[in-house]
Image (spheres, grey):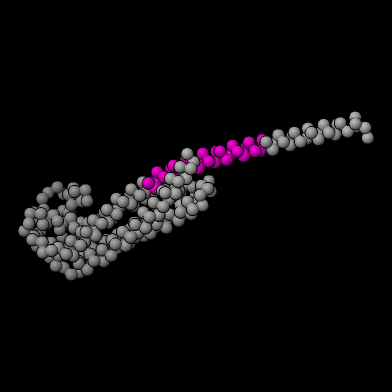
Amino acid sequence: MTDNQRTPWLRIGAESLAIIGSILLAFMIDALWDNYQDRREEYEILLGLDDEFTRNLDSIEVSMQQVNRVVDSIDFLLNPGGIDLDRPDAIEMIEQAVLYSSFTTPPDELSGGIRDALLETGKLDLIRNVELRQALVQWPISVNQLEQQRTAVTGFVMQSLLPHLSSLGVPLGEIRLPTGRRLVDQQLSSEGLSARYAGLLADQQYLNLVTVRNWWALGTLQDYQDAAKRAREIVNLLKKEIEVAD
């Protein structure tokens, strides 16, 4: 076979290699672009999650303050220290303690919109950090525990504590709200009010109910502490990933 006969095949082979190389290069550029797009989307997701869980930590802190106020109020009712009901502020002190121990439940404001959307759309895999993905998947455990605790506490208060308070003649309609505003704007000067509160503090059934309420409050506080720990771990992982992405 002559050189003239070999030349077309060499040229065809070279052209074929060039075409294959161009296709592979195009695929590589496309893959690099897709990867760049994924990383940019991951970065935006990380920023959104960081904001979401930082706000969750703030909400947990507020809720823990409220639960601690409940515990302090119950401690006051169970150990009033021989408070003199003739003191000008005695009724208000008892009134506030009754309010926080009987009515106050922490707000249920833990958000999970971005996290939930990632699971629903299947985009959670865009987050490359396996530990962070697992922490996000497990986050609802804390949220569900808090919701169950809240539901149980509300049921106990509505079914047991408030009916007993009402049976003792406690003026529920005049008790202060947590914001400091009265349900009715008037001074607590009703005749016999001191006697009703004195009877409340001496009523063993009420004190037993308040003791149970305290158990619920301490359990809720522990749940919030656990949730805060999980949220803080997630925020720390997020910040590390954001720092790397920057």
Q: In terms of image quadrants, where is residue 87?
A: bottom left
Q: Nearer the viewer, residue 92 or 160?
A: 92
| Magenta stretch, residue numbers | 26-54
Q: Is residue 12 above or below residue 108?
A: above
Q: Is residue 210 above or below residue 6?
A: below
Q: Residue at x 51, y 49 (%)?
A: 129
* Residue at far bottom of view: 204
x and y percentages locating residue 71 in the rendered image: 24, 60
Horizontal side of residue 215 vs 123, given as left or right: left
Query: Magenta includes 30?
Result: yes
x and y percentages locating residue 64 in the rendered image: 29, 54
Q: Residue at x 63, y 36 (%)?
A: 29
* Residue at far top of view: 4
Q: Residue at x 29, y 62 (%)?
A: 218
Any part of residue 151 in sight: no
Say how many tags the image has.
Answer: 0
Q: Nearer the viewer, residue 229 or 45?
A: 229
Q: Quadrant of the N terminus?
A: top right
x and y percentages locating residue 7 in the rendered image: 86, 31
Horizontal side of residue 99 vs 11, given as left or right: left
Q: In terms of image quadrants, where is residue 68?
A: bottom left
Any part of residue 76 in sight: yes
x and y percentages locating residue 164 in the rendered image: 21, 65
Q: Nearer the viewer, residue 25 or 222?
A: 25
Magenta: main secondary structure:
helix
Query: Magenta includes 42?
Result: yes
Q: Residue at x 31, y 51 (%)?
A: 61
